[in-house]
Amino acid sequence: MKTGLSHLYIPGPTNLPEDVRRALAVPMQDHRAPEFAALVTPLLQDLKPVFGTTEGTILLYPGSGTGAWEAAIANTLNPGDKVLMARHGMFSTLWAEMATRLGLQVELVDVPWGAPCPVETFARILADDSEHSIRAVFVTQNETATGVASDVEAVRAEMDACGHDALLFVDGVSSVASVPFEMDAWRVDLAIAGSQKGLMCPAGLGVLALSPRALALAETNTMPRAYFHLGDMANAHAAGSFPYTPPAPILHGLRAALDRLNAEGLDNVYARHVRLARGVRAAVEAWGLRCVAESPACASNTVTAIYTPDGVDAREVIAIARDQFNCYFGAGLGPLAGRAFRIGHLGDLNEGMCLSALSIAEMALNAAGARIPYGSGVAAAQQVYAPAPGQSARPAIAAE
Amino acid sequence: MKTGLSHLYIPGPTNLPEDVRRALAVPMQDHRAPEFAALVTPLLQDLKPVFGTTEGTILLYPGSGTGAWEAAIANTLNPGDKVLMARHGMFSTLWAEMATRLGLQVELVDVPWGAPCPVETFARILADDSEHSIRAVFVTQNETATGVASDVEAVRAEMDACGHDALLFVDGVSSVASVPFEMDAWRVDLAIAGSQKGLMCPAGLGVLALSPRALALAETNTMPRAYFHLGDMANAHAAGSFPYTPPAPILHGLRAALDRLNAEGLDNVYARHVRLARGVRAAVEAWGLRCVAESPACASNTVTAIYTPDGVDAREVIAIARDQFNCYFGAGLGPLAGRAFRIGHLGDLNEGMCLSALSIAEMALNAAGARIPYGSGVAAAQQVYAPAPGQSARPAIAAE
Amino acid sequence: MKTGLSHLYIPGPTNLPEDVRRALAVPMQDHRAPEFAALVTPLLQDLKPVFGTTEGTILLYPGSGTGAWEAAIANTLNPGDKVLMARHGMFSTLWAEMATRLGLQVELVDVPWGAPCPVETFARILADDSEHSIRAVFVTQNETATGVASDVEAVRAEMDACGHDALLFVDGVSSVASVPFEMDAWRVDLAIAGSQKGLMCPAGLGVLALSPRALALAETNTMPRAYFHLGDMANAHAAGSFPYTPPAPILHGLRAALDRLNAEGLDNVYARHVRLARGVRAAVEAWGLRCVAESPACASNTVTAIYTPDGVDAREVIAIARDQFNCYFGAGLGPLAGRAFRIGHLGDLNEGMCLSALSIAEMALNAAGARIPYGSGVAAAQQVYAPAPGQSARPAIAAE
Amino acid sequence: MKTGLSHLYIPGPTNLPEDVRRALAVPMQDHRAPEFAALVTPLLQDLKPVFGTTEGTILLYPGSGTGAWEAAIANTLNPGDKVLMARHGMFSTLWAEMATRLGLQVELVDVPWGAPCPVETFARILADDSEHSIRAVFVTQNETATGVASDVEAVRAEMDACGHDALLFVDGVSSVASVPFEMDAWRVDLAIAGSQKGLMCPAGLGVLALSPRALALAETNTMPRAYFHLGDMANAHAAGSFPYTPPAPILHGLRAALDRLNAEGLDNVYARHVRLARGVRAAVEAWGLRCVAESPACASNTVTAIYTPDGVDAREVIAIARDQFNCYFGAGLGPLAGRAFRIGHLGDLNEGMCLSALSIAEMALNAAGARIPYGSGVAAAQQVYAPAPGQSARPAIAAE
């Protein structure tokens, strides 16, 4: 029987803060009553800073982040529309598949898994598209499968450089609320998040943020759509409501989560994610292992995918951690299956949690056949996390 | 400030049983781990008896019941397909609108709000459709807006009588798990439920049950679909998984809810709903008011819509109950706005709860201008609910 | 199997407000850390207005109200000390037994169960005690067993009238936080409450409030005591701590409960208890039954004990309510066993809850052999609870 | 603001298992109803194996373990009775103080903090007490303040060797349910536990186990007592009840905790505590630090008290862990204040949790001025915890 804390280090769902968790066990209520609107309306407002937008509109779709993807596409693009996408991990792959399913014409740039969005290639393609046949450019800000961050701002800069007026779509599912997202500054048109990552809630809500331009397009778009119809949702949201019954526990959880993000301060949240991620990467280096991210420059601050040594099956590492240590790591997906495992380090996390993840990883790797000195990665991370000797009087966490 | 229990008598979300509620505050877990599959697989199995099927397939879509509607249509019908629907309440109306949006050609039979599905008209239309151009017949088993039950079995009988091979779709959102549903016996092809009604969970899961025929159709259907793609879901479900991250708290709640339904016994659940509904209707009669349901024969056992007396605004009744008595009734929808209010009496309910609903309704009706003797409806319901004098030794609730 | 809400109308533990309940499921924490002191210290402060004191000291004993009784006695009285007590219900009887067990010499005034504290008899005894051999006068503000309120202020007035300097002890277990308690104004020396009544928490904390005089006495008292030693507790409390590990969930619950009391406003809380109790008593009268309280003047606003008609066993009423309707009433205790049942109407309660209690009582009474018109008591209570017709615009609950 | 998991490594309250925690948020219920007895009676039964007794009687006192101490003494000993106790830590010291307060004549053997109960000295004193003037021998099985285990069985053996018939009292507050306790085999007369340690619940219940001999003594004992009166409690317990209102959430939590202990199996629970403790002690050794326990033979398997290096203030270590890393260690108590900190490793714990405790301790120690190689203690513990390379197929936790 498993005992003790279940150590959860997948890249989502993430660990629930206590107050989020308690908020879930809410009695049901009338979702058409004024009290419910008084819950919903501020959520829509308070999500804006998380997306870095004041002009944008937030919609909450009951469902998963995948649903928000579909809502984004179905409300602003039409079958036959040409879109530019890169494929460099499982989630960008799935996104492209969805676009194809929905009838879009996908111009797909394949780059190695481990590489970020190929900004220069995109730049060239966009510059070549003098007729602006490309209706939208898709960027995965954080490839959850590879632990690779892409530079949304750079893509915007290239679009501007060649004067391309395509819509800019960003998948921020595993980045929003954990790393900076500047929707207004980067002029992102459609951005997507899920409740179960940086927003520290269970899955159940797909979050869609739209620029005024995207919102306007939705009014006249012709792709058939019903559940994800933006007009229905926007109209209902305007009254603090939903066109169908929403998952109330997740909404209450989101309230608690936003309160926490605000109490910590978004900048502190981002800084914490940087610090914790640095520790994890220091451990990987100390182990002599290699991140899937092709370079530190594109290493994600929310999830690290790690190649196991030759001959060591990553699935076994994961199974040992799970079965022997009640610890959950992310699997290598697609071509990475068996070759890599992932440590999620986003959401409501702290140093001690990362260190337990690393210490368990060391035991599981060795048990699976790797030769990694015990404590080596932990020590490297501790170097990152520890206050310097004699600096115990530095501002405590409370004041960070 | 509102104090005490919030009396919730809307037709969903319904009151959560204690163990469902506690199950919601579950820590997050790896939705790709074997433990999670060990949660999901039995859910899919245990939902079958609730739908009265052994042959059918159950799919759980993260989203609402509306999402399950879309999943049903998008996976088995195609733009231009002709379907037969009745419009006799808000939800049948919305269902028809969705069908239209998704490109179906809807043959719409309008009957008064308060009437059930017009079986005879359907029979005639189907008999006339010698070329079987109608691809599907839609029946709303329980019109939540009017409190009207329709006879699914009778529709099937008429289809059989004229040898029509259309698919039979049933909206069971506010009926499944509260009143008998016999998918196999009635040869229903697609049936839909939501987690937040008879299943006594928060909203967040749309439940779709498919016959083998419907399942087979889904494989070759050509309507563009992504989020609701049945193949993805069915494949994932076969491994106890989901194609995207599901709302774990609702799944755990569903486990607890199914355990309760099984502990009570589905037949006892159905009998309880009949008994509680009879008490509510007895009260309406004692008040001298009229149900929206045009006859007792079609009165729903899960929700009762009640016309207020002339000159009494149902919205005011609802507002008084809400603001003065912390009690929530369902509003009259569409043309019934202001003319009717609804008492939901489904899910985890008992006699005392119905009596508090009725006693509050009496106060709110009077305060809104009606002239209803206090206690009159309560007394009528008590007659239904009370054990006969001297029969205190009748089997207790525990043994029913 | 029991379904639906469990209707709890015993005089404690009372129904938990939602936020109290959620506060219980708190993770454990270090009870010696500053964060814990930051929880405890404000509790001690915020309980003072509930007792009507600014000068007094509050102590929280892990245990029940009975423990607080012992703490009160053991820290301020010594074996052989003479105390004046009345016996007019089960709890005053138990209190006198405890006093005897702890070696006090109890001057016991027996009055009928149903009568309040016999102020005039007390006055005579105190006046006759010219040597002030009586060290303490005990008053049960609310006899939970009989539903009888006693007049603490009148006892104080009589003590003053004859210049008696005895300590004044008050058992406020089922009254504090539900009805006015004016410790300073009435110069009460030791007052006792439990967490599970008006404080709307689970049992687990005995609350003791002491006047400065009582506190001073405790320093030199010689009765052997350890667990309930006031010095240990007072010293620890001064640092926001406890001399032994306290039940953290109840403390967190108490925080939430005090926040609710303050949000509603104590005066509104008291007014609500008056209103709800009046409705219950109106029902009893309408039923033609008799309260145990000998007159309306001494009828408790937190609990009503009701004699069943001749030949109707109150235990059967209770059993029917419990087994058939999932509803819990208080039993008749001691000589009232079988002759009376009790409806608790204190804590987090509203009109609809009282009406469900009354409507279930009507069914259970009849099933046990009484002949009470259905709805009769409910109607009488509705008259008390209902806004007048046309007065729907009166201030809503929120503004009361 | 503190983020992430609060790492709790004090020796109680311990980390709550998930199902215990959810069980706390239970609605209130009638503590005199049959359902409540159906909760209580099995608890009393199921605690017996935890104490290693079939003959004994279990009592649950609302309060803390300290209350159970008092109940043990007050019901079986009388003022003036002579008892033999050792003082070798804060809790044995407090126990002796309580005995003195309650009027016992305490023969006190002082041994260094860090030493166990001095069995040989006890043997000599008992042998010299030819008149059997010593009525009871007290043993602290686990001194929580020093992390020292004492040998109860050896004390019993010495009592037998000299034919001494004193009662044998054992404080098992921080040992019961974590390490073997054999009440019947060791012929312990009174044993005490608290709900908040190995029983993995919040504080709120003091558990007292009595031998038939102790139970018989209680019937005639004359020490004044009320709240802790054994007769009241035993009579009430016989009917699954309490003489006053018990803390229902803790009782429900205890049900969940006992279910977990039984699911894991007590022998596996004990083995787990040994394994986890060995890892912690290996870390202390690797750090070059010294345990307060004077030898490995008496080192506790539930808590380790660790001397900080000269010049390193243990209070600072604790404060850094708390303020910078959201981690709670136990303080050095009494003469150990500032010189030692304690790591609690009992209850619902696993390897990853211990490793996070150790990794945080390394950072805190260094920040407070120690010179300890990062990862050194972690590595030593990993050696203890890790499956051997290639042995990944060893039975998983589930099968242990």
Image (cartoon, coloured by chain):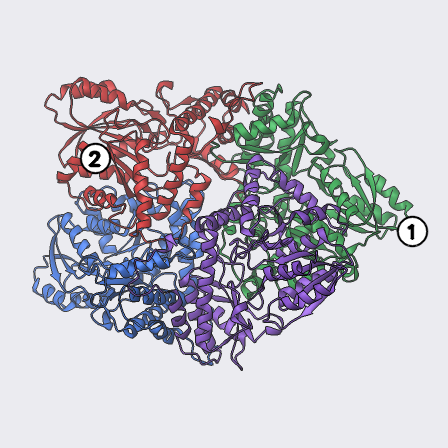
Chain colours: A green, B purple, C blue, D red
Tell me which corner region of the image, top left, top right, bottom left or bottom right, holds residue D174: top left
Describe the element under mark 1 as helix, strand or loop.
loop
Q: Chain of mark 1?
A: A
Q: Where residue A131 is drawn, which disc sits there?
A: 1
Q: Residues within 10 Å of mark 2 (few under 14, many from 20)?
A: many
Give the amino acid type for the residue marked by disc 1 in the picture. Glu
Residues marked 1 and 2 touching at CB (< 8 Å): no
Describe the element under mark 2 as helix, strand or loop.
helix
- Give whichever of C116, B361 is nearer the camera: B361
**Left or right for D230, reference A86:** left
Q: Are marks 1 and 2 on the same chain?
A: no
Q: Quadrant of the N terminus of chain D?
A: top right
Rendered view: D298 above or below C384:
above
* Residue D254 spot, x, y in % from top left: 37, 41
Nearer to us: label 1 or label 2: 1
Instruction: Residue at 25%, 61% (x, y): give it.
Output: C314
* Residue C40 spot, x, y in % from top left: 38, 49
